[in-house]
Amino acid sequence: MDTKAVRDLDEKALAGKLGEYRQELFNLRFQHATAQLENTQRLKAVRKNIARILTVMNERKRG
């Protein structure tokens, strides 16, 4: 998910996406710990998406 797509979402949608990505990250970490994860780059991508969403949410809160 790119930054432009994140900025187009409203607050409810952002909170929903944030929850989805956090749940996915939780599942990916378990898969990684049990050596079932094949695409390890997905961990990095999900963490970056979470950071993008949090950044946009904080920008809106401040401004």
Image (cartoon, rainbow, N blue to C red):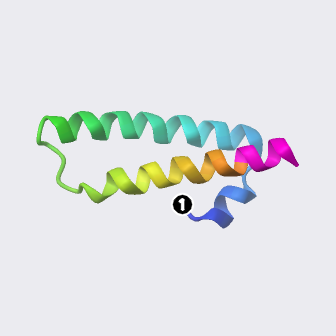
Q: Is residue 17 left or right of residue 59?
A: left
Q: Position of residue 59 (x, y in %)?
A: 77, 50
Q: Residue furthest left?
A: 35
State the residue at coordinates (72%, 37%): 12
Q: Position of residue 44 (x, y in %)?
A: 37, 55
State the residue at coordinates (65%, 62%): 5
Numbered range of the magenta stretch? 57-63
Q: Residue furthest right?
A: 63
Q: Is residue 19 above or below residue 57?
A: above
**Label 1 SS:** loop
Task: State the residue position of label 1.
Answer: 1
27 is within the stretch colored magenta: no
Q: Is residue 22 left or right of residue 53?
A: left
Q: Relative to the observer, which residue lies in front, 58 or 42?
A: 58
Q: Position of residue 7 (x, y in %)?
A: 72, 58
Question: Residue 32 is drawn in which quadrant?
Answer: top left
